[in-house]
Image (tube, helix red, strand yellow):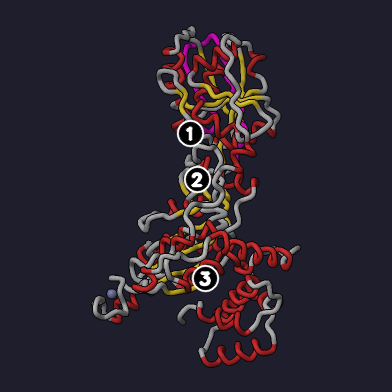
Amino acid sequence: MFASVISGAVCGIESRLISVEVDISNGLPGFSMVGYLSSEVKEAQDRVRAALHNSGIHLDPKKITVNLSPADIRKAGSGFDLPVAVAMLAAYGRIPAKTVEGIFFAGELSLNGELRGIHGILGMVGEAKRAGCHSCVIPAANAREGAVIQGIRVYGAKDLDGTVKHLLGEEILEPYTINIEETFQNGGKCPKEDFSDIKGQEIVRRAAEIAAAGRHNLLISGPPGTGKSMIARRIPSILPPMTFDESLEVSMIHSVAGILPEEGILCERPFRMPHHTVSAAGLAGGGTVPRPGEISLAHRGVLYLDELPEFQKETLEILRQPLEDKNIVITRNTGSFVFPADFILVASRNPCKCGYYPDRTRCRCSEHEVRRYLHRISRPLLDRIDLHVSAEPVTYEELQNDAGGESSAAIRARVLKAHKMQTERYAGYKIRFNGELPAEAVSKYCQTDEEGRELMQSIFTKKRLTARTYHRILKVARTIADLEGEEKIQTKHLSEAVCYRPEE
Ligand SMILES: [Zn+2]
């Protein structure tokens, strides 16, 4: 007897439908699984056998062959347990083959037959719906996540026994439904942490606003305890809330990584803060069938690297390509995977190893040590950061001032205005924000008035700017002008932009 059911596999962040075929014949009893499988998938036979047995289902020993097709996709994970079990039952005639038609199955089985949640359900259910499946049976732990996809019936099963009873019509499960609009509306789209919590640090706050407005990367230098991380953490709160499509896109990535929040959909822009001991694979994504790394989990949000010089140099080098291309390509012998990685990079660093340079009452680092510390960040990486600012220790007066700073909502309103200007300016062009402007397009889009040209000329000669720094100042000035709704860049915008240039 032969039977097949529909399941799915995650490839990168995309999902592909997999057909799980089972053939039962009267040869020598045995169990074999084929179809380009990882070792976890092959272990399914042991889990399935034990789960069936412990669910009180006894099958005559026969020659069982399981094939997962198409054969060109590497299958990993334990999500094939349930579809293998169901296909076996159908092949044995315990479940009418007709009843499993058009149903998507996925889930890991424990030895006692319970169903355990798996990663990547959101994308798989989405794919099942596109392929015309009318319903899906997935672990109860994943039901909410699956129900985010509208237009397909989602059944969350607790165990194999429950699944079989549902399919036989003995105990039909209730479809799991959520009101997706309501979930999205109440999803806390704007983070609770607010810029009004921050005292002082006007310059860093302003740089954060410019970073959010023009999607520029930002480096904050300063001694410990100056609130660098507090400010970085609040940058998602001044970015526009994600649209539903963005939210779904980001949720798919987090679903594959298995870190979706309970709501089943991520409504707030991501803020990722990997520790400096993170590996290259942890940052970029890795594994035989690669999983998204921190840079992809930060997609559409902020990646914050605290204590930048403490990261491994080789680890940081992998940031270069995604900072340009807004995605990362990971090549394995199982194929090439493209992960989205469109984020604002915010980094912080101490001015020296001990953190207190140039305060010589506290810092005992030699000039040489200070230089060496700062040079631990490579030039090509620094070149991709438009905004460089220093955070000064908070003064006593600022600390005593109870009135906090401007709220995130007020700053966000200006950021939105600047985004609108850029959307109009770059309509039909491949870039969206000033931070993405290539050098050759700077003179076209960053036009200054007569006075501004003279100012730039004098700064260029006096400060001996490189062409790169010159372009960077103009791009940042473009964003400052956009925040004010000005089409032409003026002297005041340029003078401010000059303050955020890196030391050469
Ligand atoms: Zn020091």
- Circle 2 sits in a helix, a strand or a loop, which is it? loop
Q: Main secondary structure of the magenta part?
A: strand
Per the model, the C-alpha gap separating discs 1 and 3 is 46 Å
* Nearer to the camera, 109 or 227: 227
Residue 90 appears in the rendering: no
Residue named by callout 3: 206
Residue 475 appears in the rendering: yes
Q: Which callout, 1 or 3, points at the residue further toward the start of the chain?
A: 1
Name which residue type carries label 2. Pro
Residue beneath the point at 60% across and 83% down? 492
58 left or right of 222? right
Name which residue type carries label 1. Gly
Name which residue type carries label 3. Arg
- Circle 1 sits in a helix, a strand or a loop, which is it? loop
Q: Are the residues flagged by discs 1 and 3 in contact, CB closer than 8 Å?
A: no
How many numbered dots are placed on residues in this image? 3
Mark drawn on residue 77: 1
Mark drawn on residue 290: 2
Residue beneath the point at 55% across and 89% down? 459
In the rendered structure, does residue 334 fall within the stretch colored magenta? no
Quadrant location of residue 448?
bottom right
Which segment is the magenta one? Answer: 14-38
Residue 253, how many percent across, how many down?
54, 45
Residue 482, how many percent across, how many down?
65, 71
Q: Which callout, 2 or 1, points at the residue further toward the start of the chain?
A: 1
Residue 332, how many percent across, how many down?
51, 47
